[in-house]
Image: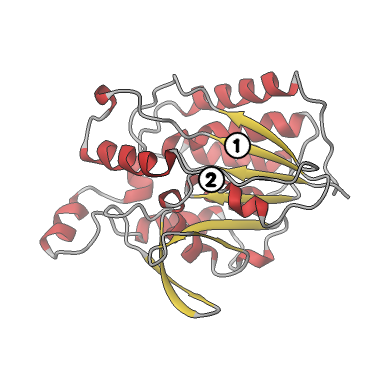
Protein backbone atom coordinates (compact mmCIF):
# COMPACT_ATOMS: atom_id res chain seq x y z
CA UNK A 1 0.00 0.00 0.00
CA UNK A 2 1.06 3.60 -0.58
CA UNK A 3 2.68 5.18 2.44
CA UNK A 4 3.15 8.67 3.85
CA UNK A 5 6.83 9.50 4.35
CA UNK A 6 7.64 12.61 6.36
CA UNK A 7 11.02 14.30 5.76
CA UNK A 8 11.95 16.81 8.47
CA UNK A 9 14.68 19.36 7.79
CA UNK A 10 17.14 21.01 10.12
CA UNK A 11 16.64 24.61 11.16
CA UNK A 12 17.48 25.13 14.83
CA UNK A 13 14.76 26.89 16.81
CA UNK A 14 12.63 27.09 13.65
CA UNK A 15 12.04 23.38 14.24
CA UNK A 16 9.02 24.48 16.28
CA UNK A 17 7.34 25.12 12.94
CA UNK A 18 7.41 21.38 12.28
CA UNK A 19 5.27 20.86 15.38
CA UNK A 20 2.58 23.06 13.86
CA UNK A 21 2.90 21.20 10.56
CA UNK A 22 2.55 17.84 12.29
CA UNK A 23 -0.52 19.05 14.16
CA UNK A 24 -2.24 20.26 10.99
CA UNK A 25 -1.36 17.08 9.10
CA UNK A 26 -2.74 14.96 11.94
CA UNK A 27 -5.95 17.02 11.92
CA UNK A 28 -6.29 16.28 8.20
CA UNK A 29 -5.93 12.55 8.84
CA UNK A 30 -2.38 12.39 7.45
CA UNK A 31 -0.02 10.42 9.68
CA UNK A 32 3.50 9.17 8.96
CA UNK A 33 4.37 5.59 8.12
CA UNK A 34 8.06 6.55 8.07
CA UNK A 35 9.92 9.61 9.35
CA UNK A 36 13.30 10.85 8.10
CA UNK A 37 14.95 13.71 9.94
CA UNK A 38 18.17 15.66 10.17
CA UNK A 39 19.43 17.79 13.07
CA UNK A 40 16.41 19.33 14.85
CA UNK A 41 14.16 17.46 12.43
CA UNK A 42 15.67 14.20 13.65
CA UNK A 43 14.83 15.13 17.24
CA UNK A 44 11.22 15.88 16.31
CA UNK A 45 11.04 12.71 14.20
CA UNK A 46 12.29 10.48 17.02
CA UNK A 47 9.85 12.03 19.48
CA UNK A 48 6.90 11.46 17.14
CA UNK A 49 8.24 8.02 16.27
CA UNK A 50 8.16 7.12 19.95
CA UNK A 51 4.88 8.97 20.71
CA UNK A 52 2.57 8.37 17.71
CA UNK A 53 -0.84 10.00 17.50
CA UNK A 54 -2.28 13.42 18.39
CA UNK A 55 -1.31 13.05 22.05
CA UNK A 56 2.31 12.71 20.99
CA UNK A 57 2.18 15.92 18.97
CA UNK A 58 0.68 17.83 21.91
CA UNK A 59 3.39 16.39 24.17
CA UNK A 60 6.03 17.51 21.67
CA UNK A 61 4.56 21.01 21.69
CA UNK A 62 4.82 21.08 25.47
CA UNK A 63 8.48 20.04 25.24
CA UNK A 64 9.17 22.87 22.82
CA UNK A 65 7.54 25.38 25.13
CA UNK A 66 10.14 24.46 27.78
CA UNK A 67 13.11 24.89 25.44
CA UNK A 68 15.84 27.48 25.81
CA UNK A 69 19.50 27.68 24.86
CA UNK A 70 20.72 26.29 28.17
CA UNK A 71 18.50 23.22 27.90
CA UNK A 72 20.48 22.23 24.79
CA UNK A 73 23.93 23.73 25.28
CA UNK A 74 24.26 23.87 29.04
CA UNK A 75 25.61 26.91 30.93
CA UNK A 76 27.67 29.34 28.86
CA UNK A 77 30.49 29.20 31.39
CA UNK A 78 31.34 25.84 29.87
CA UNK A 79 32.57 27.66 26.74
CA UNK A 80 35.48 29.19 28.65
CA UNK A 81 36.56 25.79 29.97
CA UNK A 82 36.33 24.12 26.58
CA UNK A 83 38.36 26.89 24.92
CA UNK A 84 40.95 26.86 27.73
CA UNK A 85 41.37 23.10 27.36
CA UNK A 86 41.64 23.44 23.57
CA UNK A 87 38.72 21.17 22.90
CA UNK A 88 37.44 21.16 19.29
CA UNK A 89 34.00 22.40 20.34
CA UNK A 90 32.38 25.16 22.40
CA UNK A 91 29.59 23.15 24.04
CA UNK A 92 29.66 19.70 25.56
CA UNK A 93 27.00 17.32 24.26
CA UNK A 94 26.18 16.11 27.79
CA UNK A 95 23.23 18.47 28.28
CA UNK A 96 21.82 17.67 24.85
CA UNK A 97 22.14 13.94 25.47
CA UNK A 98 20.23 14.24 28.74
CA UNK A 99 17.48 16.12 26.91
CA UNK A 100 17.25 13.34 24.32
CA UNK A 101 16.92 10.74 27.05
CA UNK A 102 13.95 12.59 28.55
CA UNK A 103 12.31 13.13 25.14
CA UNK A 104 12.77 9.66 23.65
CA UNK A 105 12.20 6.75 26.06
CA UNK A 106 13.29 4.11 23.53
CA UNK A 107 16.97 3.16 23.69
CA UNK A 108 17.46 1.81 20.15
CA UNK A 109 16.23 3.56 17.01
CA UNK A 110 15.00 0.32 15.44
CA UNK A 111 12.57 -0.21 18.35
CA UNK A 112 10.52 2.97 17.82
CA UNK A 113 6.81 2.27 17.19
CA UNK A 114 6.94 4.33 13.97
CA UNK A 115 10.08 3.76 11.86
CA UNK A 116 12.57 6.64 11.82
CA UNK A 117 15.72 7.29 9.81
CA UNK A 118 18.25 9.71 11.33
CA UNK A 119 20.47 11.65 8.93
CA UNK A 120 24.08 12.52 9.71
CA UNK A 121 27.14 13.55 7.70
CA UNK A 122 30.16 11.28 7.45
CA UNK A 123 32.95 13.77 8.05
CA UNK A 124 35.40 11.70 6.02
CA UNK A 125 33.36 11.58 2.81
CA UNK A 126 31.13 14.62 3.33
CA UNK A 127 28.16 12.51 2.28
CA UNK A 128 24.84 12.02 4.07
CA UNK A 129 24.20 8.80 5.95
CA UNK A 130 20.70 7.65 6.94
CA UNK A 131 20.63 5.41 9.99
CA UNK A 132 17.89 2.86 10.59
CA UNK A 133 19.32 1.39 13.78
CA UNK A 134 21.62 2.31 16.64
CA UNK A 135 21.55 4.14 19.96
CA UNK A 136 19.14 7.08 19.78
CA UNK A 137 21.28 9.36 21.96
CA UNK A 138 24.39 8.78 19.84
CA UNK A 139 22.56 9.21 16.54
CA UNK A 140 20.79 12.43 17.55
CA UNK A 141 23.97 13.86 19.07
CA UNK A 142 25.70 13.20 15.74
CA UNK A 143 22.82 14.56 13.65
CA UNK A 144 22.88 17.87 15.57
CA UNK A 145 26.69 18.16 15.98
CA UNK A 146 27.32 21.52 14.33
CA UNK A 147 31.07 21.62 13.71
CA UNK A 148 32.87 23.79 16.23
CA UNK A 149 29.83 24.02 18.48
CA UNK A 150 29.28 20.39 19.50
CA UNK A 151 31.69 17.46 19.43
CA UNK A 152 31.57 15.04 16.49
CA UNK A 153 30.33 11.55 17.27
CA UNK A 154 31.97 8.25 16.37
CA UNK A 155 29.39 5.73 15.15
CA UNK A 156 30.00 2.10 14.31
CA UNK A 157 28.95 1.04 10.84
CA UNK A 158 29.35 -2.02 8.66
CA UNK A 159 32.88 -0.96 7.72
CA UNK A 160 33.92 -0.02 11.25
CA UNK A 161 33.80 3.23 13.26
CA UNK A 162 33.35 6.52 11.40
CA UNK A 163 33.04 10.10 12.62
CA UNK A 164 29.80 11.97 12.03
CA UNK A 165 28.61 15.58 12.33
CA UNK A 166 25.46 17.61 11.71
CA UNK A 167 23.20 16.36 8.92
CA UNK A 168 22.99 19.85 7.44
CA UNK A 169 26.64 19.78 6.39
CA UNK A 170 25.72 17.46 3.53
CA UNK A 171 21.97 17.97 3.15
CA UNK A 172 19.82 20.30 5.23
CA UNK A 173 16.65 18.60 3.97
CA UNK A 174 17.42 14.84 4.00
CA UNK A 175 15.54 14.01 0.81
CA UNK A 176 18.14 11.49 -0.34
CA UNK A 177 17.09 9.38 2.63
CA UNK A 178 13.55 9.32 1.27
CA UNK A 179 14.80 8.38 -2.18
CA UNK A 180 16.33 5.26 -0.66
CA UNK A 181 13.00 4.30 0.91
CA UNK A 182 10.21 5.17 -1.52
CA UNK A 183 7.97 2.65 -3.19
CA UNK A 184 5.51 3.19 -6.07
CA UNK A 185 2.59 5.36 -5.01
CA UNK A 186 4.24 6.74 -1.86
CA UNK A 187 3.76 10.38 -0.93
CA UNK A 188 6.66 12.33 0.55
CA UNK A 189 5.75 15.25 2.78
CA UNK A 190 8.70 17.63 3.13
CA UNK A 191 8.53 19.58 6.41
CA UNK A 192 11.07 22.28 5.55
CA UNK A 193 11.80 24.94 8.19
CA UNK A 194 15.15 26.07 6.82
CA UNK A 195 15.80 29.73 6.16
CA UNK A 196 18.24 31.28 3.72
CA UNK A 197 20.01 34.31 5.24
CA UNK A 198 18.85 37.33 3.25
CA UNK A 199 21.44 40.03 3.98
CA UNK A 200 24.42 40.78 6.19
CA UNK A 201 22.13 42.29 8.84
CA UNK A 202 21.06 38.80 9.85
CA UNK A 203 24.65 37.83 10.75
CA UNK A 204 24.64 38.97 14.37
CA UNK A 205 27.20 36.60 15.85
CA UNK A 206 29.94 34.11 14.92
CA UNK A 207 27.27 31.42 15.17
CA UNK A 208 25.17 33.19 12.54
CA UNK A 209 28.17 33.36 10.22
CA UNK A 210 28.79 29.63 10.70
CA UNK A 211 25.16 28.73 9.99
CA UNK A 212 24.99 31.00 6.94
CA UNK A 213 28.17 29.42 5.59
CA UNK A 214 26.81 25.91 6.07
CA UNK A 215 23.55 26.82 4.36
CA UNK A 216 25.45 28.36 1.46
CA UNK A 217 27.53 25.21 1.06
CA UNK A 218 24.46 23.07 0.35
CA UNK A 219 22.10 25.64 -1.18
CA UNK A 220 22.80 24.88 -4.83
CA UNK A 221 23.27 21.14 -4.64
CA UNK A 222 20.91 19.21 -6.86
CA UNK A 223 18.01 17.51 -5.14
CA UNK A 224 17.49 13.81 -5.81
CA UNK A 225 15.07 12.94 -8.61
CA UNK A 226 12.16 10.81 -7.47
CA UNK A 227 10.22 8.37 -9.65
CA UNK A 228 7.19 9.87 -11.35
CA UNK A 229 4.85 7.63 -9.38
CA UNK A 230 6.00 9.22 -6.09
CA UNK A 231 4.31 12.49 -5.13
CA UNK A 232 6.37 15.15 -3.35
CA UNK A 233 4.34 17.55 -1.19
CA UNK A 234 6.43 20.49 -0.02
CA UNK A 235 5.57 22.28 3.21
CA UNK A 236 7.83 25.31 3.50
CA UNK A 237 7.83 27.58 6.55
CA UNK A 238 7.66 31.29 5.74
CA UNK A 239 11.25 32.41 5.17
CA UNK A 240 10.34 36.04 5.86
CA UNK A 241 9.78 35.27 9.54
CA UNK A 242 12.98 36.06 11.43
CA UNK A 243 13.23 34.21 14.73
CA UNK A 244 16.78 35.29 15.51
CA UNK A 245 19.57 32.81 16.15
CA UNK A 246 19.29 29.04 15.97
CA UNK A 247 19.04 28.95 19.77
CA UNK A 248 16.38 31.69 20.12
CA UNK A 249 13.25 29.94 21.41
CA UNK A 250 11.21 33.08 22.13
CA UNK A 251 9.03 32.63 19.02
CA UNK A 252 7.86 29.06 19.54
CA UNK A 253 4.12 29.76 19.63
CA UNK A 254 4.31 31.91 16.51
CA UNK A 255 6.21 29.16 14.72
CA UNK A 256 3.54 26.65 15.74
CA UNK A 257 0.95 28.90 14.11
CA UNK A 258 2.97 29.47 10.94
CA UNK A 259 3.55 25.73 10.57
CA UNK A 260 -0.17 25.00 10.81
CA UNK A 261 -1.05 27.76 8.34
CA UNK A 262 1.51 26.45 5.85
CA UNK A 263 -0.06 22.99 5.85
CA UNK A 264 -3.60 24.30 5.54
CA UNK A 265 -2.60 26.40 2.54
CA UNK A 266 -0.95 23.46 0.79
CA UNK A 267 -3.76 21.01 1.58
CA UNK A 268 -6.27 23.44 0.15
CA UNK A 269 -4.74 22.51 -3.21
CA UNK A 270 -3.98 18.87 -2.35
CA UNK A 271 -6.51 16.14 -1.53
CA UNK A 272 -6.00 14.70 1.97
CA UNK A 273 -4.03 11.47 1.98
CA UNK A 274 -4.84 8.86 4.61
CA UNK A 275 -2.08 6.81 6.18
CA UNK A 276 -1.53 3.24 5.01
CA UNK A 277 -1.33 2.12 8.61
Does residue 26 appear left or right of residue 206 in this picture?
Answer: right
The residue lying toward the viewer, choosing from 21 and 186, is: 186
Identify the residue at horizontal 60%, vertical 47% (top origin). 224
Q: Which mark is residue 191?
A: 1
How is the model colour-coded?
Answer: secondary structure
> What SS does tag 2 mark?
helix
Identify the residue at horizontal 68%, vertical 60% (top origin). 112
Q: Which mark is residue 41?
A: 2
Q: Position of residue 198 (x, y in %)?
A: 35, 24
Q: Position of residue 81 (x, y in %)?
A: 15, 59
The residue lying toward the viewer, choosing from 236 and 40, is: 236
Q: Position of residue 208 (x, y in %)?
A: 28, 36
Q: Position of residue 141 (x, y in %)?
A: 43, 59
Does residue 131 appear left or right of residue 247 in this picture?
Answer: right
Q: Quadrant of residue 133?
A: bottom right
Identify the residue at horizontal 54%, vertical 27% (top origin). 237
Disc 1 to disc 2, how far (Cα)?
9 Å
Q: Residues within 10 Å of mark 2 (few under 14, many from 20)?
A: many
Q: Which mark is residue 90?
A: none
Position above or below: 26 against 173:
above
Q: Residues within 10 Å of mark 1 (few under 14, many from 20)?
A: many
Q: Are marks 1 and 2 in contact (CB under 8 Å)?
A: yes
Position above or below: 82 against 196:
below
Identify the residue at horizontal 77%, vertical 36% (top origin). 30
Q: Residue furthest right?
A: 1
Q: Residue furthest left?
A: 84
Whichever of labels 1 and 2 marks the residue nearer the N terminus, that label is: 2
Amino acid sequence: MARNIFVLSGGGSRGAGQVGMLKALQAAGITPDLLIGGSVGAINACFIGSHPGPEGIEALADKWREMDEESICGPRRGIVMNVARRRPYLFSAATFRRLVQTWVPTYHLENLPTPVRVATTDITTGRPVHHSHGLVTDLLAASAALPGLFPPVVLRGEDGPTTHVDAGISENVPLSGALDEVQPGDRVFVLDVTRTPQTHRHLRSPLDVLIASLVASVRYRDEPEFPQDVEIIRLKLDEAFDCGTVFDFSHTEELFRLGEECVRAVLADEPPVASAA
